[in-house]
Amino acid sequence: MAERADTAAERAAVPERRGPLGPGSPNPGPGSVPLGLLKTARPRQWVKNVLVIAAPAAAGELFSRHALTQVALVFALFTAAAAAVYLINDARDAEADRAHPTKCRRPVAAGQVPVPVAYAAGGLLAALAPAAAAALCTPLTAVLLAAYVVMQLAYCVSLKHVLVVDLAVVTTGFLMRAMIGGIALGIPLSRWFLITTGFGALFMVSAKRYSEAVQMTQAAEDAAADGRPERLGATRALLTSYTTGYLRFVWQLAAGVAVLAYCLWAMESGGIAGTGLLPWRQLSMVAFILAILRYAVFADRGTAGEPEDVVLRDRALALIGVVWLAMYGFAVADW
């Protein structure tokens, strides 16, 4: 008993260490802030910015020195703009994220990065990315990048709570990535490129939302069966306004339009005389359709999360993607 009393007295004598999350949470060291900023910038999401090569690759103008330099620059600038949005979003949602079972581990919510620092870093990147684009690229590139930042910040503040508009904004973000490479190089963007890319992006975005809705409903049912409270929409509040039937309709519609647009583009381009060994552009339709059908399997199961995760985890889908890229490359090179 004396030993326990001594221990209690020692604890009372030592001042309680308080972090940003309350008692017992560690205070971040100075070296952890840069690492936390980098983590908040979502390096795993940077793979989405590879879409900037889509238009130059489709036009067969990717491999000149000027094109490679501009595409690399646009990739870096778009990554900086996206990082700015992530930083400001996490700073704004810090309090809500601390109550979330997984988002509480984000650096800003966990206190590794102070909220003012996240705001400052995000604001700086949001201003520098379009300014650098104006100085180093075409004016239209800077305008598009600035529009992306404004649109995404509006999404973080309010648009993510507006039914259907949230799907349109996220889809437009993907479309802007695909457009900016062509705009930076002055490449005309065909209607088929825009339609296929836009509806392909909507297919993946709505499939992800559908998967989130299915998993949210399943989690609520499991919690009810176990007698645990589970608040619907805790992960993404707007999901409670969608029905799984509606989201299924959206991704099925988007998949159909994307396939139709790609096939029309491939057949229309096939009318141009070429010296290739095989009609690669028309043959690429097979790989494209197979990729959509394979991705739809995961969407239907409710397991289509982040697009890059779906592609990298499924070897068959990754292989189909490689085959499609090869056929597309042969068509562009006219082999």
Image (cartoon, grey):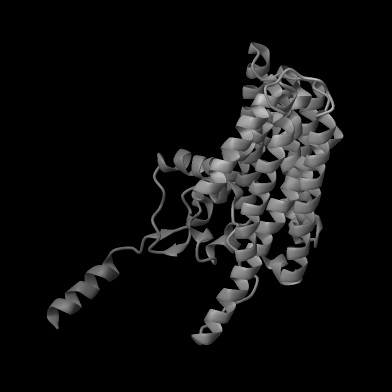
- Taking the view exactly as shown, the residue that stands out farthest to the top is 65
Closer-to-camera residue (16/220):
220
Q: How many marks?
A: 0
In percent of width and height, residue 252 lies at 75, 59
Q: Is residue 46 left or right of residue 134?
A: left
**Along the line of sight, which residue is nearer the eye, 156 or 279?**
279
Which image quarter: residue 78?
Answer: top right
Front residue of this view, candidates 37 and 56: 56
Instruction: Compare residues 203 and 295 and report the one nearer the observer.
Output: 295
Q: Residue at x 65, y 48 (%)?
A: 290
At a point 51% along the width and 83% down the height, the residue shown is: 228
Q: Position of residue 182 (x, y in %)?
A: 76, 26
Note whether residue 150 is visible: no
Does residue 142 appear left or right of residue 1 in this picture? right
The x and y percentages for residue 37 are 51, 41
Give the residue drawn at x 78%, y 40%: 262
Q: Is residue 122 above or below residue 168?
A: above
Up/down of 221 relative to 277, above or below: below
Q: Is residue 55 visible?
A: yes
> The N terminus is located in which quarter?
bottom left
Percent from the top left, x then y, of residue 143?
81, 30
Q: Quadrant of the C terminus?
A: top right
From the viewer's perspective, tell me whether residue 294 is left or right of residue 171: left
Q: With respect to residue 49, does 257 lie above or below?
A: below
- Considering only vertical position in the picture, is 228 above or below 211? below
